[in-house]
Image (cartoon, grey):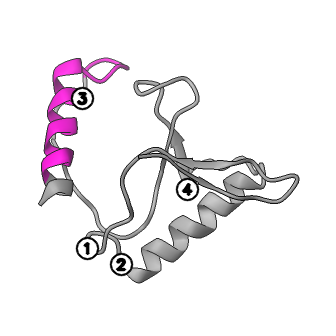
């Protein structure tokens, strides 16, 4: 399901493809922080660390929005190259999905 949130003349549209901010795992404070950061993005602000980090493995313009709420450790491994191994990425995606579904 797709949701589109109306914005002002200079704001970028916020298009919600699927999912929701759940509580748990998101606390009230984390939902407020997420809303604030999304609003900044709508206004055209560029967010960097610690609030946002590029995720080119997902897509060229994709970023993760980093909300200080819970720390979820998906995997620990020895990284020997600059690129994260595909097997590790796939494992982490599966574990994160299981966490979100729980």
Q: Are marks 2 and 1 in contact (CB under 8 Å)?
A: yes
Q: Earlier in the sequence, mark 3 or mark 4?
A: 4
Q: Reply yes or no: does residue 91 show up in magenta.
A: yes
Locate residue 57: give its quadrant: top left
Check residue 24 in the rendering and tell me which mark sits there, or answer none: 1
Check residue 51 in the rendering and tell me which mark sits there, or answer none: 4
Per the rendered image, the range of residues in magenta is: 80-98
Check residue 89 in the rendering and tell me which mark sits there, or answer none: 3
Q: Residues within 10 Å of mark 3 (few under 14, many from 20)?
A: some
- Going 61% across and 59% down the picture, which residue do you hit? 38
Locate residue 100: give its quadrant: bottom left
Query: Disc 2 marks which residue?
Result: 27
Image location (x, y in percent) of residue 89: 24, 29
Distance of mark 3 from mark 4, alpha carbons? Answer: 21 Å
Q: Residues within 10 Å of mark 1 (few under 14, many from 20)?
A: few
Distance of mark 3 from mark 1, alpha carbons? Answer: 24 Å
Q: Earlier in the sequence, mark 3 or mark 2?
A: 2
């Amino acid at each position: 399901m797709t949701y589109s949130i109306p914005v002002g003349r200079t704001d970028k549209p916020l298009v919600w493809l699927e999912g929701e901010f759940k509580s748990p795992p998101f606390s009230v404070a984390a939902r407020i922080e997420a809303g604030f950061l999304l609003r900044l993005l709508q206004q055209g602000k560029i967010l960097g660390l610690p609030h946002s980090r590029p995720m080119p493995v997902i897509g060229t313009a994709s970023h993760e929005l980093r909300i200080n709420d819970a720390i979820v450790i998906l995997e620990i491994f020895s990284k020997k190259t600059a690129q994260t191994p595909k097997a590790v990425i796939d494992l982490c995606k599966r574990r994160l999905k299981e966490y979100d579904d729980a």
